Amino acid sequence: MKRFAVIDIETTGHTPLKGDRIIEIGIVILEDGMITEEYNQFINPNQPISPFITQLTSITDQDVQNQPPFEHVADKIIQLLSDTILIAHNIQFDLNFLNEELIRTGHEKIQPSVIDTVELSRILFPTAPGYKLSELAQFLYITHNQPHRAISDALVTVDLFLVLYNKIQTLPKEIQHYFLKFSSNLKSDVHLLISNQTSDESKQLVSINGIILKEMSKGKKRPLENIANFQHFLDAFYDKDGYLDKTFEKYEMRKSQLQMSEIIYDHFCRKEHVIIEAETGIGKSIAYLIPAIYEAKKSQKPIVISTSNINLQTKLIEDDLKQLQDMIDFDIRVSLVKGRQHYLSLEKFEKFLHDNDKHSYHHIMVKSIILVWLTETESGDLDEIQLPSKDQQIRQQLIIDQPTKSKYWKEYCFYERMKERANNADIIVVNHALLSLELSHKSSILPPYSKIILDEAHHFDMIASRYLGGSLHYFELHAFIQHVEGEVPTKELGNELETIKYEIDVLFRGLFEFVRNSPSNVRSFSDQGRMQRIWDISDKKDKDIYLLIDSIQRTKLYLEQFYTSQQDKKWFDSYRTEWRKYLDDLHELLLATQEDTVTWLEIDQNGARNAVYMKKELFTAAKQLSEKLFNQKESVILTSGTLTINQSFHYYIERLGLNNNEINCYQLDTHFTYEDNVQIFVPTDFPELTYPNNDPYIYATCEAIISLASQLNGRMLVLFTSYDMLKKVHDLLKESEELIDYMIIAQGITTGSRNRLIKHFQVFQQSILLGTNAYWEGIDIPGNDLSCVVIVKLPFQSPYDPVFVKQSMYYKQQGKNPFVELSLPKAVFQFKQGFGRLVRKETDKGIIFVLDHRIMTKQYGTTFIHSIPKVPIHYDSIHSLINKVNDWI
């Protein structure tokens, strides 16, 4: 190995040109894989260190006040870095900051060869959960005792670099050659790390056209053995010294969990449907998996399990099913099934890899990441890898959108592999969206099945309403046309496709402006902050729509003409069905009129000017669910922690299109003593919530959050129903001097995914997390990390929300009360989910602070209160409640 210098700096901020300075530097010299020298030095920045930086690094003004300024240590740093290859975790930040300081103090900047361990980690560990140094250290089992301290971070970066260096040496020669070719387009001088030693070829790999793939393992399906009946199988798990007792420390048998397993198997045998409400702490995943595994093995027919989103699909397989597989002595064949747009097309990737015009930094990173990942993945599921959000358009061009035409790739097609695994599986795990598409016959992936378990079932009918309606977005349509363009047999046809692409672009730009320029009374915002506007072609008053009709008709005409002229041509065979689908989607979304649906458009105001999402949703999917699911399957099991309102299943059963006598219902006892662990506080003197001017309520919300923060030292989750209100509260809190020591993390404002923001919230001791609808459920922050959930307002949809207005009109036409049948039940379901964020374990304790006093003053408030576990409620002035907080916590 060559001589390397690993560097890490801590600073007062990110911008040296605006006066930020280095406060600590750590350098480790590495030669022949051994550390030969360490250098660690505090540096006096001659300016105060902010509370945020002190909290992040634990470096105080006192630590640096008697230390040398940078100009006194610059020569030593230059000498240490001389004739080395410089390594850092985010090399651009450390090197640029260091050079600015060198120039400021009269020295020349250094220009060494560099290695960026962030970049290399992204390439060599494409499935890592994150690429911060602490995340990688945890992922690779590297000890990291003092994050955000220079010498500690530098030493961890040394360990990380050695792991990366060793992995490069083990890669197949073909991939190393690609890295040599790509090196000049990367930040890192990767060519300096590739040696002439023989790479490790012991992995089960296969080379196809210069692309290295992992061979797919072929497990054998073995029947259930040595267990005579279900009761013995159940006892093997739940008895003292059973599988669960041996696996989980301090395990106690929960009657509700056992009861749930028994109820499910009983309904499998009787071929009946059942609804089971099982609250947090019961362990419902294990409870339904045990009878599902037994039934699948016994009948040799698959059991389908559907959950609300892809993250929960993955968790079910990687956590719960893996734990159960480790307990028992026979194989459980599990298949994770997603739509084909989640899988890499090897045919497309081969073209992309060899396309020399795709040589930007982002293209090279995507090529490098996928090359390494293909040596490790059996699924080809692109959700496994961490592609930056800015590379999503590249991803869209690499997904499978139709059957492969290449003979040599057909055998290795990941989508076909997935379907083959599903055909041989005991347990098939899907999400509600894919299941809805299956019910609508817009997708056909699943093998025949007769029994299904729906987890997080409170979402199912809403997701079905959305996916039975339809959607389309610009990138999807553009990527498809672009793919067809690459296969056209003549130049003339290529020119026709260019015209079609132009018309599509003009149309979507027009739709973008239609949303962007919409009056405030006809627009709303999604959880992601996207602007939304209703599209209703039957609304004669909406002149903006009629200005776009010509463009819609013209685009549709060009698409129709091309389809008609090519539908009998052989080259068009693999595109015909997809082309027809997009034609029909455009018509259904923009030109068709249906009384029982609502269509809207969404845009990211800061996104591309043609990036428009079209969405159509049914007002109710009850008829479709009754006909296509409940009447077709032997046994449908629906479970969630949120299925009753006022202790009744009536509303939920109606949403499913069923009658009370068509399905059995069970509400299992909770495992938690909520009365001892949770209290609800409601202020008597909060301002009234008014529309559209709610400024007094927003100011009062900020004051309440500030007062609570001082009592609780942060550790608060603040739940909103409006992104606009969240943003206003965030901006006011950031201006507050009283919260200068607090980390305020806000959905849609703070950069990062939901999981990443939650990690930030847990890492910083004094932190406040602001979230909208996506944060009311599906997040798990146990223990002392969360002491208080603030519910800013009862989660009713805004009465001015255009989608809600359309739904209300539909309900009135059906002779129903929109508030009773639509608003109140949805709000209660969401309130129950928000309540459930606080207590995730038996030892958790905290406060639910409901700022909206309608829960106490309105008649419908009792519906909210009677739908959650019985807990003490304090209804008093905000001042009195704040004083009580400390006593309780």
Image: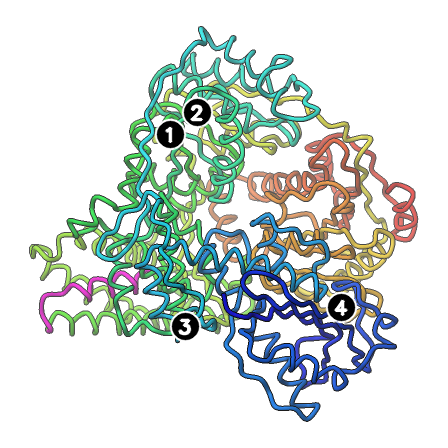
Residue at the image position 61 percent from the left and 90 percent from the top: 108
The nearer-to-camera label among 3 and 2 is 3
The nearer-to-camera label among 1 and 4 is 4
Of the numbered discs 2 and 4, the one sitting upstream in the chain is 4
Q: Quadrant of the C terminus?
A: top right
Q: 561 above or below 298?
A: below
Of the numbered discs 3 and 4, the one sitting upstream in the chain is 4
Q: What numbered label is drawn on residue 53?
A: 4
Q: Is residue 525 visible?
A: no
Which residue range is magenta in the image?
A: 476-491
Measure the C-alpha gap from mark 1 to mark 2: 8 Å
Q: In this view, does 8 lie to the left or right of 294?
A: right
Q: What element carries label 2?
A: strand
Q: Does the magenta stretch include residue 489?
A: yes
Q: Name the residue under label 3.
A: 361
Q: Position of residue 752 (x, y in %)?
A: 58, 60
Three-letter code for the amino acid on which mark 3 is drawn? Tyr
Q: Determine contact: label 3, label 4, CB under 8 Å.
A: no
Q: What numbered label is drawn on residue 636?
A: 2
Q: Where is residue 298 in the image (x, y as percent from the top left)?
A: 38, 14
Q: Determine contact: label 3, label 2, CB under 8 Å.
A: no
Measure the C-alpha gap from mark 2 to mark 4: 54 Å
Measure the C-alpha gap from mark 1 to mark 4: 56 Å
Residue at the image position 43 percent from the left and 72 percent from the top: 186
Of the numbered discs 3 and 2, the one sitting upstream in the chain is 3
Query: In the rendered image, which quarter is residue 727 located in?
Result: bottom right
Measure the C-alpha gap from mark 3 to mark 4: 32 Å
- Give the class, few, some or many, for how many residues have Cα within 10 Å of label 4's Cα (few <14, many ≥20): some
Measure the C-alpha gap from mark 3 to mark 2: 49 Å
Q: Determine contact: label 1, label 2, CB under 8 Å.
A: yes
873 or 521, nearer to the observer: 873
Q: Is mark 4 on a helix, strand or loop?
A: helix
